[in-house]
Image (spheres, helix red, strand yellow):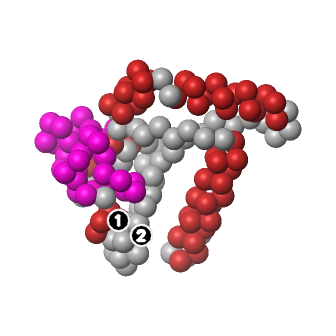
Amino acid sequence: MTQINLVHIPYKGTGPALTDLLGGQVQVVFGAVTATMPYISTGKVRALAVTGTARSELLPDIPTVGELVPGYEASAWYGIGAPKGTPVEIVDRLNTAMNESLADPKLKAQLADLGATVLTGSSADLGKLIADETEKWAKVIEFAKIKAE
């Protein structure tokens, strides 16, 4: 979106990427708040922006990339799936149990302390999220001419 040319280094996790950032081997890392917060809070790493649609509650003074580059959004998310063919009644029961668990104030607070935002919804909501994310990233891959190696 900005035409900035960055070299992607395929680290095997945030830990090795942060090690190289702290050691001066790389100049920037796109890392989850949950992993980078200890280094940000001690001043070892400077947060420039967060990539989600809203500012992080843990970093309220740090802008989103979207505030600087309108339309930008990239965030990690997790969902729980079941094997294809799982009866709808079981999927619905699991979904209800997960939503109830994620509504627990204590769990929400613990996740918020890690920089996570809880999203609840139906299995159809998750299906739509997956479809939307697939479409969004397919456009990025096509635009950037990314090829599997």
Quadrant of the drawing holding the C terminus: bottom right
Question: Residues in magenta?
Answer: 34-63
Check the image and report above or below for 97 versus 114: above
Q: Are marks 2 and 1 in contact (CB under 8 Å)?
A: yes
Question: As shown in the figure, which amino acid type bears the numbered disc 2?
Answer: Gly
**99 falls in the magenta region:** no
Residue at the spot 64% in from the left edge and 46% down from the top edge: 126
Residue at the spot 62% in from the left edge and 65% down from the top edge: 135
Query: Taking 46 as reference, is 89 left or right?
Result: right
| Marking on residue 71 | 2
Question: As shown in the figure, which amino acid type bears the numbered disc 1?
Answer: Gly
For numbered disc 1, what is the local secondary structure? helix
Check the image and report above or below for 105 versus 39: above
For numbered disc 2, what is the local secondary structure? loop
Check the image and report above or below for 101 versus 38: above
Q: Position of residue 120 (x, y in %)?
A: 56, 38
